[in-house]
Image (cartoon, helix red, strand yellow):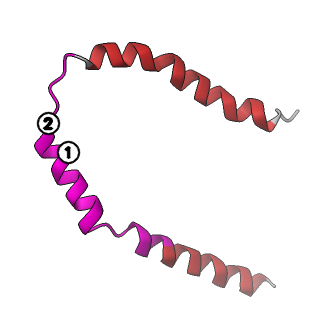
Amino acid sequence: MRRPILATALLPASLLLAALPAGSLLAADEKIDLAAITRIRDEAFNRSKAQETLSKLTEIGRASCRERV
């Protein structure tokens, strides 16, 4: 039996929301490493290959779809 799409989509979201308050209370005492965050942002904005990779994957997908037709 198939579950309704809406129920399937909402279940993980509701579990995540239920876990947020407990997690935010535990994380309140942690120190934030701003240098690490800065390095991650720099890597993401200046040397990310995500768009290039996505473009290659979509081209491969298009080519395989053309072969099936």
The residue located at (43%, 71%) in the rendering is 51
Identify the residue at image location x=23%, y=60%.
43
Q: Is residue 15 above or below residue 40?
A: above
Quarter holding the N terminus? top right
Left or right for 60, reference 69? left
42 or 59, nearer to the observer? 42
Marks counted in the figure total 2
Quarter of the image for the C terminus: give it: bottom right
Q: Quadrant of residue 27?
A: top left
- Picture layout, residue 25 above or below residue 9: above
User: Which residue is pictured at 77% across the width and 82% down the height?
Assistant: 68
Q: Amino acid at mark 1?
A: Ile
Q: Distance from label 2 to label 1 (Cα)?
A: 6 Å
> Mark 2: few, some, or many residues within 10 Å (few <14, many ≥20)?
few
Which one is in front, 1 or 58? 58
Q: Which residue is mark 1?
A: 37
The reply to whether callout 2 and callout 1 are in contact (CB within 8 Å) is yes
In percent of width and height, residue 39 lies at 16, 53
Q: Which residues are magenta?
A: 29-54
SS at mark 2 in the image: loop
Q: Residue at x 63, y 76 (%)?
A: 61
Say which element carries label 1.
helix
Main SS category, magenta section: helix
Magenta stretch contains residue 53: yes
Q: Percent x, y for residue 25?
A: 32, 13
Instruction: Give how far across and how far down residue 8 sits, in percent.
Output: 72, 33
Q: Is residue 68 magenta?
A: no
Name the residue carrying label 2: 33
Q: Quadrant of residue 24?
A: top left
Amino acid type of the residue that numbered disc 2 sits on in the rendered structure: Asp
